[in-house]
Image: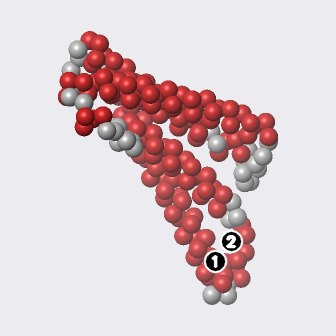
Amino acid sequence: MNFFKRCDRALARLEGWLLVLFLTVMVSLTFLQVALRALSTYGHAPWANALMGQIDWAEPLVRLLVLWVSLVGASLVTGENRHIKIDLMSELLPHHLQPYRELLLSTACAVISGLILKAAVSYVRMEAAFGGSLFSGLPSWVGQLILPIGFSIIFLRFVLRAAGEAKTVFRGGRR
């Protein structure tokens, strides 16, 4: 197994663990908020209301983690070649032309991911210049870093896939 495949598998394992961690934190914090709200409203427990005030950062964190889960998940499914595809050509093209189709689609996806990556970097720079904060004094641009990170990984995966398909097409390599 070559170096790139080992790196991709290690990255996929890391992404899987991050997804488990982020989802666990999201579900736990959301459950805690709902339980405290119910205790405060229906149980008339003043301590629950006071505790809700102490964890007012939980809701913005959960919203931020939704973004992180989305991008980490998108990167993971891209690496597994299970991303959303609208593909009529695979049914219409003969089997011997499939590598050309894969090369074209991988290249197009890499270009689009690269453009989105460029926009994501610009967005994070604007957030840093604006100077807003998310919660507990955390700068907003720190939370938005997943955008360039996620799209750079997606971009890299499409570039590697396009390179592999180019090898198949131009050198007659085996899949």
Report the residue at 33% width, 18% height from top: 166
The three-letter amino acid code for the residue at tag 1 is Arg
Residue that mark 2 sits on: 52
Q: Position of residue 147 (x, y in %)?
A: 59, 39
Report the residue at 47% width, 34% height from top: 154
Residue 105 or 61: which is nearer the viewer?
105
Describe residue 14's horizontal placement relative to residue 57 as left or right: left
User: Badges 1 and 2: C-beta atoms under 8 Å apart?
Assistant: yes
Describe residue 114's horizontal placement relative to residue 88 as left or right: right
Q: Position of residue 16 (x, y in %)?
A: 41, 46
Which residue of the protein is positioned furthest toward the bottom in this rendering? 43
Between marks 1 and 2, how big is the CA–CA gap? 7 Å
Vertical arrangement, residue 173 with respect to residue 29, above or below = above
Vertical arrangement, residue 42 with respect to residue 94, above or below = below
The three-letter amino acid code for the residue at tag 2 is Met
Local crowd size for mark 1, using a 10 Å CA cut-off: few (<14), some (14–19), many (≥20): some
Chosen colour scheme: secondary structure
As drawn, the label of residue 37 is 1
**Disc 2 on helix, strand or loop?**
helix
Q: Position of residue 4 (x, y in %)?
A: 37, 24
Using the rendered view, name the quadrant where residue 12 is placed.
top left
As drawn, the label of residue 172 is none
In what quadrant of the picture does the N terminus appear? top left
Report the residue at 61% width, 52% height from top: 64
